[in-house]
Every structure is written in C-alpha cells, then in structure tokens.
Image (cartoon, helix red, strand yellow):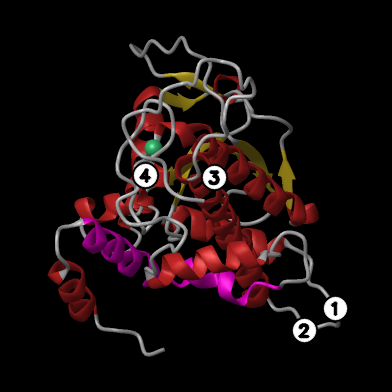
Amino acid sequence: MAARSYETLKGEVFALPNNLEGKVRREALLAHEAKESGAWMTASPWTADTKMSDWVFGAASRARLCIRMDEVPEGTKCQVKGCGRTMDTLGQHAFTCPGLREFRSMQAAQHQRRLRGTTRAAGEGIITLPDEPVVQTWMQPKAGREVTVEKRADVGIIPKNGQNAGTIVLIDLTLEATSTAAKESGNTGAAAQCGESKKDQLYERDYERKPAPAPPALVKGFGQETGGPLGDFAKKFLRYCAEQTPPQGLPGHDPVGRRYGRILEHFSVFLQRHRALVQQQYIHQCCLPAPPEAEPNDAAAPEEGEEAPEE
Ligand SMILES: [Zn+2]
C-alpha cells in the first residue's frame, strides 16, 4: 500500500459529508493512517493474546472497511429500556447506547491489563509495581495546590535502563475516541496525543517530585485511540518495552523491530476484541426483542409503542 500524501488524506477527510456515514468514514481514514491501527491484521492466530475469533475478525474488517451490519435492519429502534433511539447499520449506536455503558467501561480495565502484561514480558529490564500505585506516595502536591483525593496510576514501573533508569514512572492510561481527532486538528493520532498532553499538564500543574532521599518519580499519560493510533509517549514506551523483552527463537531471529511489532499487535487486537464484544451486545440487547414474560397468565403486557423487529 503506497502511503498517501498528507494533502490527499486531508482532502479525503474533509470532503466527506457531515452525516453519520461521513463521520464513520472520517474516523476510519484518520485511524488507518497510523501503522499501529492495522496491526491486528498481521497478529498471530496461535497465541492467546492475539487470537481473534471469526466474529472478532469480521467485526474488525467491517469497521476498517466501513461495511454495514446485516444484523441490524435499517431504521430499527433500540430495544434497551429507556433508550428507544434509532439504531444505525454501521453500529455506532453501540458506542453511545446507555444500555451498553458497562461494556464500554470494561475497556479501561482491559487496557490496563494489556499494558501490565507488556511490562511484565519485558522481564529484567522493567520492574512492574504491584496494583495501582498511589501517586502521592512518590509525588507531593505543589505549594498552594490542595490535592485531597488519592490519585492512583494505572501502572507503575521502574525502568532499569535508558534515560529514566531508576525513576519511578507512573503511567496514567487514557483511551480517546478517534472521532475527537477530527475536532482536534484532523490529523492522525491527534486525539491520542492530546489525551497524553492533557494528562501530563494535569500532573505538572498539581504535583512535583518529593525532595531526596525520595526516589525520583514522574507521571506520564499513555494515550491510545479507540481506532488504534497511539500517542508519542505510548509508542516510545512500548518501543522501550520491546528492547527489554527477551527475543524468542534462535539468535538474530527476533530483532527489536519484530518484538515491537508484536506488542503493537497485542494492543491492536485488544481494541478489536473489545469492539466486537460491544457490537455483539449491540445485536443481542438492542436489536433482538426482549424475551417474553415468564408468567403467561399475567394480563398480557401491552407492547410498547414501537414494533419489535422480526426474528
Ligand atoms: Zn440504545
């Protein structure tokens, strides 16, 4: 695939209509210009971390190519209690429906587990702190800043090599919707980058390092977009993890670049699995009619205004 010029991409992104389909295509175009967004396509189907079921692979391909969902008939009303909005065949309602909120929040926990798995795989090169380290243990609020809430980082690590060797790096994960990138600047990865900067600024405003003998510490935002692109710190950090991860196989057969690629695949597959899970729930909860009441002799519960879809 030849890389398109920046102007061509910009032109394509802005020429899209301002309706739902245009929005979905804009998001797909913005996401896909980042190499890491499509990493799931080369992921190994043989390892537990990157295995994708047919459904997951189908959902991932559908999202990338902006293909409509056959399972959702045009104009169907959402069956979730209290929602009732019109569902769209591109599956976007899945990401805003109140009935699927819990599945969306599950994503943050999976993201954290993914990063933790990556730092652990780096073996001796990175010490991973247990649990979610409390920021105030290593950093103190700046003068005049009242910070009463206990802030917890998602993952805390101590790199053994490189420029931050020996520093306690507290990582605050952030998942940003790729759709907001269009609003930020219209550039690929803008939302992930902006998410990282916001986190960094927040901590810089409120916290500073504790004086010696406390060990040096810093807090960093790690940004990823729902469409796949990673922020600059995220990429740099994952590259470091790849350098520290012991190679597999025969000497010379697993260079850093390949290890880095594998880590990107893990992060990419995690997003696709999650998207597929949410869309599966979308079809089950929003699209299929609710099961009939168990008690048949209950005076026939009147149907809600909307007709339920067939099947
Ligand atoms: Zn809904």
**Few, some or many C-alpha atoms within 10 Å of disc 2 (few <14, some 14-19, many ≥20)?**
few
**Few, some or many C-alpha atoms within 10 Å of disc 1 (few <14, some 14-19, many ≥20)?**
few
Residue 249, numbered circle:
1
Q: Amino acid at mark 3?
A: His
Task: Say which label, 4 or 2, has the lower sequence index.
Answer: 4
Residue 284, numbered circle:
3
Asked whether 67 or 268 is in front, the reply is 67
Q: Secondary structure at mark 1?
A: loop
Q: Amino acid at mark 4?
A: Gly
Q: Secondary structure at mark 4?
A: helix
At horizontal 18% and vertical 57% (from top left) the residue drawn is: 19
Q: Secondary structure at mark 2?
A: loop
Residue 195, numbered circle:
4
For this view, does 194 lie left or right of residue 130? left
Check if mark 1's residue and mark 2's residue have beta carbons within 8 Å: yes
Q: Quadrant of the N terminus?
A: bottom left
Which residue is tagged 2? 253
Q: Measured along the vertical axis of the image, is residue 76 above or below residue 145?
A: below
Q: Which residues are magenta?
A: 20-44
Residue 65 lies in what quarter of the image?
Answer: bottom left
Check if mark 4's residue and mark 1's residue have beta carbons within 8 Å: no
